Image (cartoon, grey):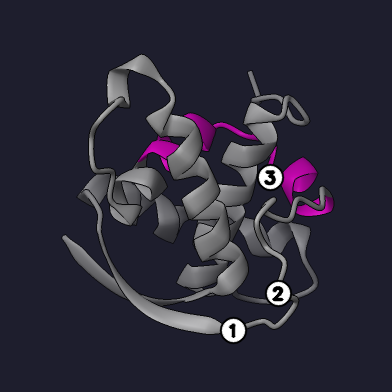
Amino acid sequence: MRLSVRLAKETLDGIHELKEILKKEDLYTGLNLTNGFVVKKAYQETKDSNWEDVLKAERIPKNNVNEKKLELKTNLNLSQEVIDGIDKLKGILPNYLTVSYVTTSFVIRIIIRAALLKRDSEIEENK
């Protein structure tokens, strides 16, 4: 399913960084990984994360040298499982924040941050 969403530059940089990490794994060597695939992989790796720890952690993508908060509209091809997971997180994440709702793009940013933090071994999954 195609999801059209505006993503912050930080999120796109995080997707790019995660994509480069995945390309180094034997399973994905030589493949052209899409942004949607990277978001799906990040979601699958982090769906059981401690979201409070993820929200508290600051993790800026390594190649994010421009501090401007630019947003870019993009299309992501995501499975229904990932879209349902994003919708579920839209209901869970406000419990850890002082807001009543969060946007889809914010949830994607947090999922990407969680995947990068997990790979940096800075967070653990809930058991």
Residue that label 3 marks: 51
Q: Where is residue 62 in the image (x, y as percent from the top left)?
A: 69, 50
Prevailing SS of the magenta stretch: helix
Residue 24 screen position, x and y as percent = 44, 25
Q: Report whether 67 appears left or right of 56.
A: left
Residue ID at (50%, 59%): 108
Q: Name the residue under label 1.
A: 70
Q: Which of marks 1 and 3 is nearer the N terminus?
A: 3
Quadrant (top left, top right, bottom left, bottom right) of the C terminus: top right
Residue 66: which quarter of the image? Answer: bottom right
Q: Do the residues labelled 2 and 1 touch (CB within 8 Å)?
A: yes
Mark 2 to mark 1 CA distance (whole Å): 9 Å
Q: Does the magenta stretch include residue 42?
A: yes
**Which of the two marks, 2 or 1, is nearer to us in this view?**
2
28 lies above or below 67 = above
Question: What range of the chain is rendered magenta?
Answer: 41-56
Residue type at mark 2?
Asn
As drawn, the label of residue 42 is none
Q: Judge left or right: residue 120 versus residue 38.
A: right
Horizontal side of 89 relative to 65 (left or right) equals left
The percent position of residue 36, horizontal first and vertical second, equals: 30, 53
